[in-house]
Image (cartoon, rainbow, N blue to C red):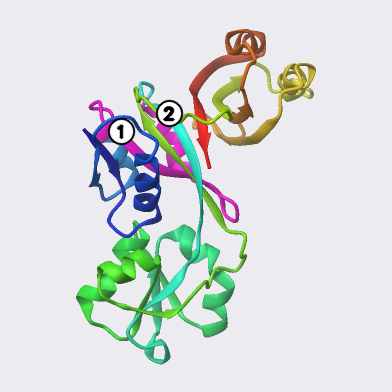
Amino acid sequence: MIIYTLPKGTYSEIAAKKFLNYIDGNYKIDYCNSIYDVFEKVANNSLGVVPIENSIEGSVSLTQDLLLQFKDIKILGELALDIHHNLIGYDKNKIKTVISHPQALAQCRNYIKKHGWEVKAVESTAKAVRIVAESGDETLGAIGSKESAEYYNLKILDENIEDYKNNKTRFILIGKYVKFKNIPEKYKVSIVFELKEDKPGALYHILKEFAERNINLTRIESRPSKKRLGTYIFYIDFENNKENLDEILKSLEKYTTFIILLGRYPVFE
């Protein structure tokens, strides 16, 4: 059985290896070039690990959109990783262009600006490191993990270059079913919905249902509905250890045109 994730040396691979410690069964890791590719593989009854939110740059929009698009795929588990970016390459003094995933570039924006480098975005941090390794070009640098530098036999020229040191990314395990061992007590629920009416107080009624049940929301975010300008859908994560989930969702139906359960899942430390 296979867990699909992003290329070797990415933080997603590190997260996938951590998930292996909690999954009951014999799984191996295989690799995809993009988040979309991971979802396509998972649709064929595999598992996958993808990023969903960063503490600096916010949510990974593509992951959110694909959770709505691939309706049979659910969130099965979550864990967070400390993210420490590194400058990787040959000679720091010769670098003119830095390449990495857009989120990594954004998380190191001040560091890059201080050095006056050009930037180029690619699909993953590991791909950036691979490009530098295969090109042999000393004017290129990559931002990525220590693991990717070791894998491609490149130097770490500078460590912990992220602008904010409390840099964490949430990763989710996605699929249709998994059996865990040593399940933690903490659970979350993720939902997405569209409000029936666009009027003052419409969202308030949703939030009131949670407040009256003393349920803690851990994230709320709007995304364009892709129907017309100015219309939105809402993603909410909330803690759910013992509450009656069916009753909570039922209470929201009268305010929404649709509500989709993206998953109820354990949160691993």
Q: Is residue 129 magenta?
A: no
Residue 235: quadrant of the picture: top right
Q: Is residue 211 left or right of residue 36?
A: right
Residue 89: quadrant of the picture: bottom left
What residue is pinned by disc 1?
Answer: 47
Above or below — where is 244 with respect to 113?
above
Q: Which residue is most to the bottom?
A: 93
Span colored in magenta = 41-70
Mark drawn on residue 33: none
Q: Where residue 199 appears, x then y in whole percent?
A: 74, 22
Visible residue check, residue 232:
no
Tag 2's secondary structure? strand
Q: Residues within 10 Å of mark 2 (few under 14, many from 20)?
A: many
Residue 151 or residue 51, whichever sits in front: 151
What residue is pinned by disc 2?
Answer: 76
For the residues labelled 2 and 1, say whether their Cβ atoms are less than 8 Å apart.
yes
Q: Residue at x 31, y 50 (%)?
A: 6
Q: Is residue 85 left or right of residue 179?
A: right
Q: Amino acid at mark 1?
A: Leu
Looking at the rendered image, the quarter that the N terminus falls into is top left
